[in-house]
Image: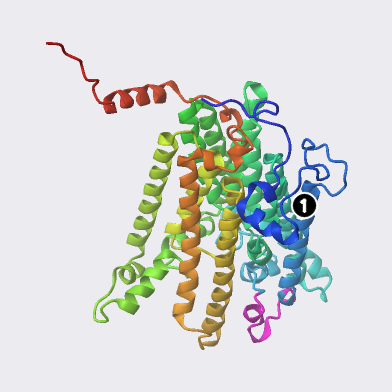
Amino acid sequence: MSTKSTPGIDGPDVPDHPSRSDGFVRGLSGLIGGPLGDHAVARGRPVGAERRFWTAVRIVLALTCLTLALHWVQKSPCQDGAWANNEQYTRFCYTDVLALYYAERLNEGAVPYRDHPVEYPVLTGYFMGALGLPVHSAGAENPDMNQGQWFYNLNALVLGALAVVTVAVILALRRRRPWDAALFALAPALLLTATVNWDFLAIGLAALGLLAWARSGPGPKGTLLVALSGVLLGLGGAAKMWPLFILGPILVLALRANRIRAALLSIVTAAVTVVLVNLPVAIPYRDNWNRFFELNTTRPIDWGTFWYIGRYLDGKFGDPASVGPFQWLDGNIPTLNHLSYALFGLACLGIGALALLAPRRPRLAQLAFLVVAAFLIFSKVWSQQFVLWLLPLVVLARPKWGAFLVWQVAEVCYFIAFYGQLLGASTGTPVFPEGVFVLAASLRLAAVMALVVLVVREIMNPEQDAVRRTYVDDPDGGLLDGAPDAPWLDRWRSRRSTVEQPPTPVATTT
């Protein structure tokens, strides 16, 4: 049984300082004089009591804006849409946002789904149309206007705002650990992929959904926030499907805490939201709406995935006269789909069992990270920008710099290798051997799996959890935070300990 995380019960309400609490940062701090001293300005002040302008929160927000600005500069060579001499690959500035403005016929004024099928879930299509159609109208009145450039910049502005919202949510969830959010703000993945696609639409909505759940509690207000969390996660799932996966951890944690009604309320409101968002398109434009599902069903093994690595190894080390298992799967897409879904389902069952059997109820962010990571590990598609899905979840689940930076280095290596593959495919001349790209993909896969192992280890050994050194239980748990385990779990543990306990020897006398 845990105690509700409130200031004054679990320690002073002061911010965490990584130079003292994080071994990696503490080691690096030796280059500038060592960890923050006992008499440093504002070290012992409660959160929110700092009198300086540049507080930790403002520094992190400023760093996020700086990273997004540098990202915009990095993408600027591609903004005119000319893309001569494969410039989009040689300068690493390709973005779906600009390419699909023309591919989805937004430049012709086509309304998504009504006039043209869209390869994304409906809320992303709505978003594309809401920004693209006004740009087309303005361009029709101003022939000299570069519509693609205006469309990209408008999207970059809105997606950047959603990225700032995401880091603001992290700061709100970690008031005593504001420097955790610097992992997000300074992540190379954010610098390189923030506007490659519309992923921050789903990420921002999912983050707000987590915040609503974290603020839930008993009473009517808490119930309203639980419902709101379902609405926000449902909207996120209507933009990109993965935010719906967070509902699984909510359900299993609520089961362990005997708060099942709240979890069901969130799930039901999410499902209703997804249905309501889809209906305006699914009914009148069924074929165009179905394009997303059709594409995901028929798509073969994509670059950089676990399956891609296996297919390469089949060709490299298998019998040239026979077809290897991964090569066979690439030609049998229905079986590949079923196997991918089955492995993800088994991983989810394992995560559920972990949540119920762990010595202490895991934190929501830990399980959410494990589920989304499992989906990417076993998915047949792992696009370069999907790293953004994991970014806020890693920060909330395991805010430690060492392993995080190793993962980010692996992602940067993959990013570079991926653009080499794109350039080679475009020109017909390989930039480097295929094995280099497979190695980069393998390093990325290994880095994500290492993070999974580390999170599982901290679930099984809660004393190693950095967040629980600052908070007693789960700052993201909402009405689960501080709740005791369900009576049925206590009874099961009691019976298990009775069965496993050896019989006590009985003394005899003669």
- The quarter of the picture where residue 378 lies is bottom left
| Residue 89 magenta-highlighted | yes
Instruction: Please identify the quadrant where the C terminus is shown.
Output: top left
Up-down: is 324 above or below 266?
Answer: below
- Position in image of residue 1 (x %, y %): 51, 25
232, 369: nearer the viewer = 369
Q: What stretch is highlighted in magenta?
A: 79-92
Q: Which amino acid does label 1 sit on?
A: Leu
Judging from the image, what secondary structure is the residue with disc 1 in? helix
- Position in image of residue 440 (x %, y %): 50, 71
Residue at point 79% right, 69% down? 139
Residue at point 46% right, 30% down? 255
Residue at point 78% right, 74% down? 146
| Circle 1 Cα neighbour tier, 10 Å, few/some/many (<14 / 14–19 / ≥20) | some
Q: Name the residue under label 1.
A: 61
Residue placed farthest to the left in the image?
Answer: 510
- The quarter of the picture where residue 480 lies is top right
